Amino acid sequence: MRRPQPTHTGADQQELEWARGAERGVFFALLLACALGWGAYAMLTAKSFYPLLVLRALIVGSCLVVVSAFVLAIPAEGILYLVSARYRQARGYRQAAEKGKPAAAWKYLGAWFAMLLVSVANGVLRDFTYGRHMDELSAHQLSTAASVLLLGLLIRGYTRICPPAAAQEAAFIGLLWLALTVAFEFLFFHYAGGHSWPDLLDNYNLMKGRLWPVVLVWIAIAPYVFFRADRAQ
């Protein structure tokens, strides 16, 4: 999909080069933060520091950083779209630059709250139905698949009713939902649910078959994916 073209001649080549440099800078900052985060996670969850375990952690961590690089290319533009009027102007989003921020932010929060209710209902369904007849890990994986499907339908409905105006806005929506979801999970389940930090972190351990990160990645990229699908039609 083409980027929207500037509606005036003020976005010259120098401003466009600045916008591209800003995108690269934010992307590498996010990638560095992601790498440090994975490293901190490995240290917190490591049972020992035998050379073989360290080597395996480095290999897995490198793969995760590579995967994260593809994901982070999306929110990098979303962050700049949100915080920098100069970036929006350079990229030709004149109307967004005049408003100063994406419109109808309360709709983003309302959609996230609906997603929260769907997730809670999915968890209740698991605990009172098939979760009683399966081992915990299998129930978790089935519940994750159901979450991806249900949240995908909900996000699809949202993008139909309130379509993002631009790819950057779609990226911002996913980034916001991701931040809200992670913050709610750690704060609520630790302080209200009484779960320890290691227990919460263990839910991110793909090596143990925990698939919760798949849901988080889907929440982050789904608005952008559906935006691209609509524009391709």
Image: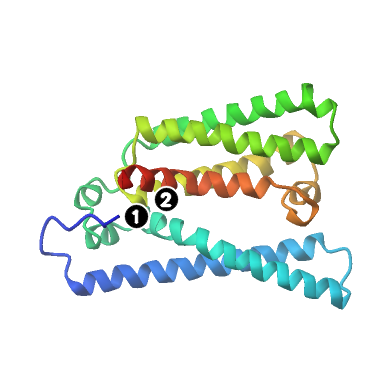
Identify residue for label 1.
Answer: 81
- Residue at image coords 65%, 24%: 121
Label 2 secondary element: helix
Q: Residue at x 45, y 56 (%)?
A: 75
Which one is in front in this view, the residue at disc 2 or the one at disc 1?
A: 2
Residue 97 shown left or right of residue 84 in the figure: left
Q: Position of residue 209 (x, y in %)?
A: 77, 50
Near-viewer residue (161 or 172) = 161
**Quarter assignment of residue 90:** bottom left
Which quadrant would the N terminus be assigned to in this image? bottom left
- Mark 2 = which residue? 171
Q: Is residue 135 above or below residue 13?
A: above
Q: Nearer the viewer, residue 114 or 82?
A: 114
Can you tell which quarter of the image residue 55 is in? bottom right
Alpha-carbon span between mark 2 and mark 1: 9 Å
* Protein image colouring: rainbow
Outermost residue to the top: 128
Callouts 2 and 1 close, C-beta under 8 Å: yes
Q: In screen coordinates, is 101 left or right of 208? A: left
Residue at left offset 38%, top offset 45%: 229
Report the amino acid beneath label 2. Answer: Ala
